[in-house]
Amino acid sequence: MTILAFSAAFIPAFAQDVTDVQQAAEQAAAAIAEAPKEEAQAVKPVYWTNSVLTNINFSQLALKNWVAGGYNAVALAGNIDANANYAKDKMKWNNRLQLDYGFMYSKDKPIVQKTKDRMYLESKWGYATPVQHLDYSANFSFLNQFHKNYDYKTPDDATFAKYPGDEPAAWKAARVLKSDFFAPAYITLGIGVDWTPWDWLAVNFAPLTGGIVAVSVPELRKTYGMALREAGLDDTVGANYRSARFQFGAQLKIDAKWIVNDNFSYTTQLVLFTDYLDHPFTKNRINWDNKVFWKLAKYFALTLSTNMIYDPNVTIPDLGHDGVQWKEFLEFGFTYTIATKKQ
């Protein structure tokens, strides 16, 4: 009887406790279900990608009692290669700025000599056509230098006699001006199509390309093919030449970039231009630039760059006519890259 009495008293109480627990669980579940849900934060699309590659290169040569000969020398050079690219839906806009500047001092010439000086800006807008990998495009470029460049000639005896006791002045008097800011400057705008079959290759053809060649320094205008203002003027006087020449023609530009890994890359650009207004398809301007970049350590790299120009309108003084112009730089020094982080 005692057991029956205990069971009769305990079982209803236990059942009530179970019921209370179930109700509490149901209320908690309902509260959780009704609680405001946190929405997953959407990833913001990135339309711009940017990068800036900087290089600073220094070299020094010191000799003492060196029988084989030579001169003490120091050189400093730097360059910046900056890119800012935009892409959204069917539209693309790529921009690249290259700046190069360098100078050296050698004991055999008691003046500072500039070794490199170049500014090059490219801007290309594109809009996708119905054809895969083919875009309508507008291509702008600007090529110039920061300030005066010289050919450093050795002074003759008469020049040294003119500046007694002032050797640097004699060397400065003997140097020959080759270029200056906006002398020359090349400004080009082309309308056409851009074909990018692979990430590493872009071929731009602009059958409607207008360009201006500007030469602000009168004594350099004849060298860069400027026309006389009027027939019969003295062709030895620089001021008698026009300061700019307009060109209208077709341009083919090929860009390629091979990235072997994070430390080694090769870029090349070939530009061909023919002027419809001046012997089309026979007098063609050619520009070919190459750069090999090899990162040897975290902050140090080896860079090989070349620039080739052939312009039938430019007279090379040493030749007396046009010809191929060539420049090469092999540099080792500090490097640092700033780039948009990958998402």
Image (tube, rainbow, N blue to C red):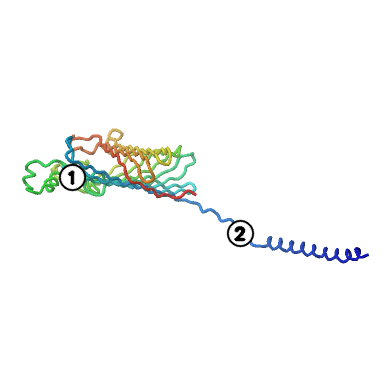
Residue at the image position 18 percent from the left and 45 percent from the top:
177
| Residue 174 at x, y percent in the picture | 13, 44
Q: Amino acid at mark 1?
A: Leu
Q: Is residue 70 visible?
A: yes
Residue at the image position 43 percent from the left and 45 percent from the top:
126
- The image quadrant of residue 107 is top left
Image quarter in which the N terminus is found: bottom right
230 vs 51, left or right, is left
- Which structural element holds mark 2? loop
The residue to which callout 1 is attached is 177
- Which structural element holds mark 1? strand
Question: 263 or 184, which is in the foreground?
Answer: 263
Q: Where residue 38 is drawn, which disc sits there? A: 2
Question: 27 or 71, which is in the foreground?
Answer: 71
Q: Nearer the viewer, mark 2 or mark 1?
A: 2
| Residue 274 at x, y percent in the picture | 31, 37
Question: 308 or 124, which is in the foreground?
Answer: 308
- The image quadrant of residue 59 is top left
